[in-house]
Image (cartoon, coloured by chain):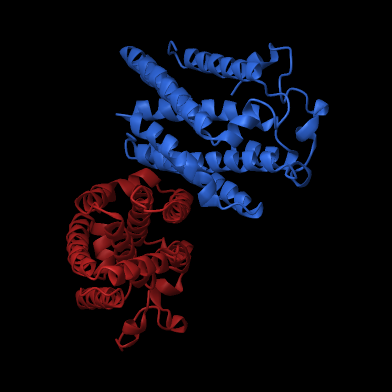
Chain colours: A red, B blue
């Protein structure tokens, strides 16, 4: 949500100054996609993101059933519907660049499904924390990657990561619940830690499986992404997570 | 879906000739809502429809998990999202006419939730048959009622009943499954019968509970709806259901 922690990393912070765009980030899709390795990496990325949105739709629709009031239910259904429309844009884009959307999404289905299966919330608050933590981490990650993408792909990725209102809604509800019943905070802090662990373990599995995507991540295709930079990226994401949890009243 | 069976009922078939609109059907909301009983009946109707759309959203999102392919999953998610947008229109309309949307929906939540709980599909095909049968019956019912409503409410009700594509998609998939494995037809025919039974039993419960709505249905508020007409309406709906099941390759 907040990128002030990024600003403290002086060297090669992507996206902090669009005027300095170089390499692929300075190109559009037509130019950048001439490199088949870059093309394959983008198809992977859009496929992962598209399946992620579809899975988010399902998760939020499922969580809507746990909503304590009709208004809460409607709020979650609205978010689910927004995720579905993001999915449609990504799927359509895959079609436009002559990639098979299903083929692009399939490799990521197992990891995302497993993540959701292993982190099924047992109540409404766990569902809200999961929506908030999951979206924030995914959003941080894709924003980091977006800065290294060609201008067309970057525009799409940033557009579908636009806040769908999860953040404020979840934060407000979770804070109120902790105020009303402070014990809840301890349980939700453990839950948030478990979510982060599962997310990292599934992310590692994806990176290990998908050559095109991981080659882009660790350099060699897009610019400026070497292994040390990936390490720094994970530090930034983890740090942002810790700050968000603290803001929520949870020790991360 | 098909209204040809309505055309065989000579007397007082609503909606068959809009040029003959009389009474409330010839009025707009501003005029018709001067009668507090009519107003209460419309709030009930919109509340029931709104909750029905929200429940349909949840059901379709749930069924999307049973989808055998990613394309099927996306198709159901699309329908779910369309139902959600219908819900939004109905909820917003309730707000416009100074009714509390949650208060209007609440009285129908139990009956609709119970219906869905008692008819949870055990597989993808049962889910499709349920979506098709449920939407068709609800659509038939609301179309019959719509013909007796003021012009503004009628326009909204007919707009949100606009086909969201469930019909063709479900029919095509179910037919193909029965062709591939004829035994499936018998199981799905039993399932469709159970759905119809549960739908009728919940509908009776709603009518018994909601004075304003049932008064409108059996006359006294809107025009032309006496008890005999309600009987004929149920006959038409049941007959249309039987025809749809036959078209699907199922004996109703």
Relative to B50, does residue B194 appear above or below in the rendering?
above
Residue B46, image x and y in percent? Answer: 59, 42
Relative to B230, does residue A148 appear above or below in the rendering?
below
Q: In this view of the protein, which residue sits in the foreground, B156 or A20?
A: B156
Residue found at x 68% / y 24%: B225
Q: How many labels does the image show?
A: 0
Q: In this view of the protein, which residue sits in the foreground, B233 or A209?
A: B233
The quarter of the rendered structure image containing the N terminus of chain B is top right
Q: In this view of the protein, which residue sits in the foreground, A16 or A116?
A: A116
B123 with respect to B176 (left or right): left
Residue A39, image x and y in percent? Answer: 37, 58
Q: In which quarter of the image is residue A241?
A: bottom left
Asked if one can make out residue B104 in the rendered structure from this viewpoint, the answer is: yes
Residue found at x 51% / y 45%: B105
Asked if one can make out residue A226 in the rendered structure from this viewpoint, the answer is: no
A214 with respect to B208 (left or right): left
**Residue positioned most to the right:** B19
Residue B180, image x and y in percent? Answer: 34, 16
Residue found at x 46% / y 48%: A95
Residue found at x 42% / y 52%: A73
The quarter of the rendered structure image containing the C terminus of chain B is top left
Residue B103, image x and y in percent? Answer: 52, 49
């Amino acid at each position: 949500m907040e990128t002030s922690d990024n600003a403290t990393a002086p060297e090669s912070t992507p996206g902090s100054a669009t005027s300095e765009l170089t390499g692929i980030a300075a190109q559009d899709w037509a130019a950048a996609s001439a490199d088949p390795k870059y093309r394959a990496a983008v198809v992977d990325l859009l496929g992962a993101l598209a399946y992620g949105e579809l899975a988010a739709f399902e998760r939020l629709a499922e969580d809507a059933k746990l909503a304590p009031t009709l208004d809460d239910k409607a709020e979650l259904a609205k978010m689910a519907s927004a995720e579905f429309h993001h999915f449609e844009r990504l799927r359509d884009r895959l079609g436009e660049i002559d990639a098979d959307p299903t083929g692009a999404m399939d490799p990521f289905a197992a990891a995302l499904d497993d993540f959701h299966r292993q982190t099924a919330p047992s109540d409404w608050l766990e569902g809200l924390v999961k929506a908030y933590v999951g979206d924030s981490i995914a959003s941080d990650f894709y924003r980091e990657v977006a800065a290294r993408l060609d201008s067309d792909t970057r525009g799409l990725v940033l557009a579908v990561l636009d806040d769908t209102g999860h953040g404020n809604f979840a934060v407000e509800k979770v804070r109120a619940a902790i105020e009303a019943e402070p014990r809840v905070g301890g349980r939700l802090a453990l839950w948030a830690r478990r979510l982060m662990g599962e997310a990292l373990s599934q992310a590692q599995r994806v990176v290990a499986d998908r050559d095109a995507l991981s080659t882009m991540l660790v350099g060699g295709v897009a610019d400026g992404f070497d292994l040390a930079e990936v390490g720094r990226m994970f530090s930034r994401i983890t740090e942002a997570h810790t700050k968000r949890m603290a803001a929520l009243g949870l020790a991360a």
